[in-house]
Image (cartoon, rainbow, N blue to C red):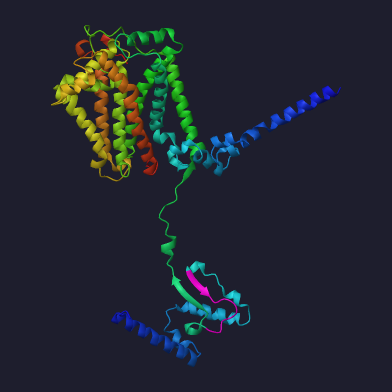
């Protein structure tokens, strides 16, 4: 008799403490060490101008966006989201690219068969490779269209001249990233597209042959080229482009947000 | 004793003489009208102070603290009780300074119509990112990336083409010396792009004011697009001219 009473009381107590759980978690030191003072994850979110500001101000998003932007800046018809999409495609390519790296060895002996195995035997392997490939083409297109959009809006004019220069560098880095990735499957398409491309660079006056030698890691395309372009593709160029992107985004804000309205 | 410069000593002496004369006259002639003319206080303020004084003869002295913020005039009002000693001209308040409204109220930043990034911008960005992902996913499900046979240095495919974004250059190679097509023209294009904000001194961003810049850039884009499409679709074996509807496509992405 008293045992069942105790059980009942125990259950009630358990439910009671379960109800308090969210409050207790939010009061805990661990929770408060993760979320900054003023974070909506500490104080809860009800729609108010103050909380709308806090969403940005007290999160990592503050590195990318200010609390407020000009009203015309949020119109899709002005930017067509091209700059943001370029950045998003870069993230997309990083994620799918890391997945591909698990199954790929950059040697002339194994590169092609690794890709083939990836497509035939790895779960989602073919899909992720497709997404990486089409994402890369789309990024080249997005960056190019972004440049055209910026030109037609006169957004390269003072005080944004230098950010335009950084943008041109980013376009070149995007092309180089795409081009270095082109070789990695080590099929006939890769080999000969890169042969044509590097032959063009070999026509550089005075030190053309040296440029070609450095790019290929030898007199002609081989396993050394593969390793070299692999390192360029997965490490060096992404590292450089991230630095330039950081400066690019920082300058967008420092130069007074996006340009316009026209 | 340190030597005092001649002009400073003179000035101090003059001031002292003036002060002595003023205090003498204030004692001698209680009527303020004589010194009133000398003081630099604007006439309307003197009027006001007189009126206030007359009023406080009966009322409490605190009521003299008249708010004059609108005129931008800082005044030091004599505090309780009504002072026996009055300033020059016999008024109870003294002009400290006249602050022109321009120097404190000049707003340089024109207020702008702004919206919160959350939710207005982040929602748009989220939808754009989601659409891009959805598009890529669906496209990747239906279209496979090319994987031709293993690379073979001894077997040159015909035609061999560069990636599509370099096909404009490859097309140029058909027309010009390799040095011109492969280095000079693309180099000039890149340098031109980098320098364009420094060459274009026109400050306007309105399309109607920059017809020349826009036509020049459009021409540049059109040439590039035509060259890329030419190299992509209209070049067949031996990189010779073909019509894609007769000879088929020779494109791999």
Verify whether residue B78 appears in magenta.
yes
Query: Residue B111's x, y, as percent?
Result: 45, 50
Query: Residue B23's x, y, as percent?
Result: 46, 88
For the point 70% across and 31% down, the residue is A19
Task: From the viewer's perspective, tell me whether residue B235 is left or right of residue A75.
Answer: left
Query: Residue A163's x, y, as percent?
Result: 32, 38
Query: Residue B176's x, y, as percent?
Result: 15, 22
Q: Nearer the viewer, residue A24 or B166?
A: A24
Q: Nearer the viewer, residue A223 or A79?
A: A223
Verify whether residue B80 appears in magenta.
yes
Q: Nearer the viewer, residue A235 or B18?
A: A235
For the N terminus of chain A, the quadrant is top right
The reply to whether residue B249 is visible in this rendering is no
Examine the rendered structure and indicate whether residue B27 appears above or below residue A256: below
Which residue is at the far right?
A1
Which residue is at the far bottom?
B28
Task: From the viewer's perspective, tell me whether residue B180 is left or right of residue A99.
Answer: left
Q: What main secondary structure does the magenta stretch of the protein show?
A: loop
Q: Quadrant of residue A251?
A: top left
The reply to whether residue A235 is visible in this rendering is yes
Q: Quadrant of residue B236?
A: top left
For the point 36% across and 85% down, the residue is B14
* Magenta residues (range): B73-85
For the point 40% across and 55% down, the residue is B108
For the C terminus of chain A, the quadrant is top left
Examine the rendered structure and indicate whether residue A142 appears above or below residue A46: above
Q: Quadrant of residue B164?
A: top left
Task: From the viewer's perspective, tell me whether residue A54 is left or right of residue B13.
Answer: right
Examine the rendered structure and indicate whether residue A181 appears above or below residue A60: above
Which residue is at the far front?
B1
Question: How many marks do you count on the picture?
Answer: 0
Q: Nearer the viewer, residue A58 or B118?
A: A58
């Amino acid at each position: 008799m008293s045992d069942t009473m105790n059980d009942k009381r125990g259950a009630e107590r358990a439910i009671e403490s379960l109800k308090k759980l969210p409050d207790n978690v939010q009061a805990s030191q661990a929770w408060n060490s993760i979320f900054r003072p003023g974070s909506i994850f500490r104080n809860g979110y009800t729609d108010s101008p103050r909380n709308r500001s806090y969403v940005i101000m007290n999160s990592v998003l503050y590195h990318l966006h200010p609390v407020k932007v000009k009203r015309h800046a949020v119109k899709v018809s002005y930017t067509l989201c091209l700059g943001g999409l370029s950045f998003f495609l870069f993230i997309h390519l990083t994620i799918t690219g890391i997945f591909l790296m698990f199954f790929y060895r950059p040697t002339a002996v194994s590169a092609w068969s690794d890709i083939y195995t990836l497509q035939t035997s790895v779960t989602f392997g073919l899909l992720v490779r497709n997404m990486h490939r089409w994402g890369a083409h789309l990024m080249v297109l997005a960056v190019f269209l972004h440049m055209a959009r910026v030109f037609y809006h006169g957004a390269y004019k003072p005080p944004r001249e230098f950010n335009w220069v950084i943008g041109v560098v980013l376009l070149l880095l995007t092309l180089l990233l795409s081009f270095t990735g082109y070789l990695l499957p080590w099929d006939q398409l890769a080999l000969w597209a890169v042969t044509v491309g590097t032959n063009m660079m070999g026509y550089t006056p005075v030190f053309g042959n040296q440029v070609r030698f450095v790019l290929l890691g030898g007199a002609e395309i081989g396993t050394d080229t593969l390793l070299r372009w692999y390192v360029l593709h997965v490490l060096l160029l992404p590292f450089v482009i991230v630095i330039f992107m950081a400066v690019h985004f920082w300058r967008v804000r420092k130069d007074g947000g996006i340009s316009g309205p026209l | 004793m340190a030597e005092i410069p001649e002009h400073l000593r003179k000035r101090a002496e003059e001031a002292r003489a003036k002060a002595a004369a003023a205090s003498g006259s204030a004692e001698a002639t209680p009527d303020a009208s004589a010194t009133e003319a000398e003081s630099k206080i604007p006439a309307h303020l003197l009027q006001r102070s007189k009126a206030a004084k007359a009023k406080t003869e009966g009322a409490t002295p605190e009521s003299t603290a008249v708010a004059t913020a609108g005129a931008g005039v800082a005044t030091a009002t004599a505090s309780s009780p009504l002072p026996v000693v009055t300033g020059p001209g016999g008024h109870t308040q003294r002009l400290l300074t006249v602050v022109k409204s321009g120097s404190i109220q000049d707003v340089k930043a024109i207020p702008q119509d702004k919206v919160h990034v959350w939710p207005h911008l982040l929602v748009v960005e989220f939808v754009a990112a989601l659409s891009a992902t959805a598009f890529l996913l669906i496209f990747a499900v239906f279209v496979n990336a090319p994987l031709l046979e293993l690379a073979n240095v001894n077997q040159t495919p015909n035609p061999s083409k560069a990636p599509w974004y370099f096909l404009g250059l490859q097309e140029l190679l058909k027309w010009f010396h390799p040095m011109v097509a492969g280095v000079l023209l693309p180099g000039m294009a890149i340098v031109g792009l980098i320098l364009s904000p420094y060459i274009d001194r026109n400050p306007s961003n309105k399309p109607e004011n920059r017809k020349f810049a826009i036509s020049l850039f459009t021409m540049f884009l059109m040439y590039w697009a035509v060259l890329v499409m030419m190299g992509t679709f209209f070049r067949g074996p031996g990189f010779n001219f073909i019509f894609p509807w007769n000879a088929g496509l020779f494109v791999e992405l």
